Amino acid sequence: MANIIFMSDDKYLVALCSFTDFGPRRVTLLINYFKNAKRAWNVEKKDLLEVGVKDNLADKFIKYRNSFNCDKYFSSLEQKGIYTQKISKNWMMPLWFYTLLVNCPFSMKMQ
């Protein structure tokens, strides 16, 4: 069973995108299939296999997710002056649009 981390859907989206083996198409596929970033983040291996993620990549993601420290990750971004910002209320815009922006459905802003 997946470790459930409590954070906002925006943070789940950033966490999904922080797993660099999932590109924007894979993240979009997972969120479309599982209906939101939180559910996509917390899926079990069998669910990843069901949507076409290869066995070794599913294992790698589960290992990454289980070792992911949300507080430490976002604190590290903040300390570096990096903040996330949603592009739109419904981020699922056409893939070509957000791949032009940052290859992910959010932007990072340095202050």
Image (cartoon, rainbow, N blue to C red):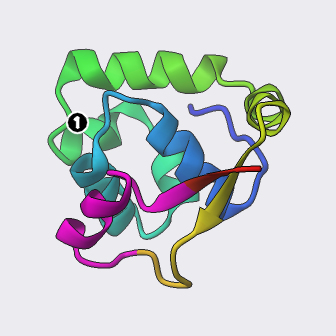
What's the amino acid at mark 1? Answer: Leu
Classify 81 as above or below 111: above
* Residue sitting at x 33%, y 43%: 47
Residue 43 appears in the rendering: no
Which quadrant holds residue 70? top right
Query: What SS does tag 1 mark?
Result: helix
- Asked if residue 85 is among those painted magenta in the image, a careful observer would answer no
Q: Whole-percent x and y of residue 12?
A: 61, 51
* Residue sitting at x 85%, y 31%: 79
Pick the quarter of the image with the N terminus. top right
Q: Whole-percent x and y of residue 31?
A: 39, 61
Q: Which residue is mark 1?
A: 49
Side of 106 relative to 102 (left or right): right
Side of 90 relative to 97 (left or right): right
Q: Whole-percent x and y of residue 75?
A: 84, 33
The magenta-colored residue range is 92-107
* Residue sitting at x 50%, y 16%: 63
* Residue sitting at x 38%, y 53%: 102
How many other residues sit within 10 Å of disc 1, few (<14), some (14-19) or many (≥20)? some
Number of residue marks: 1
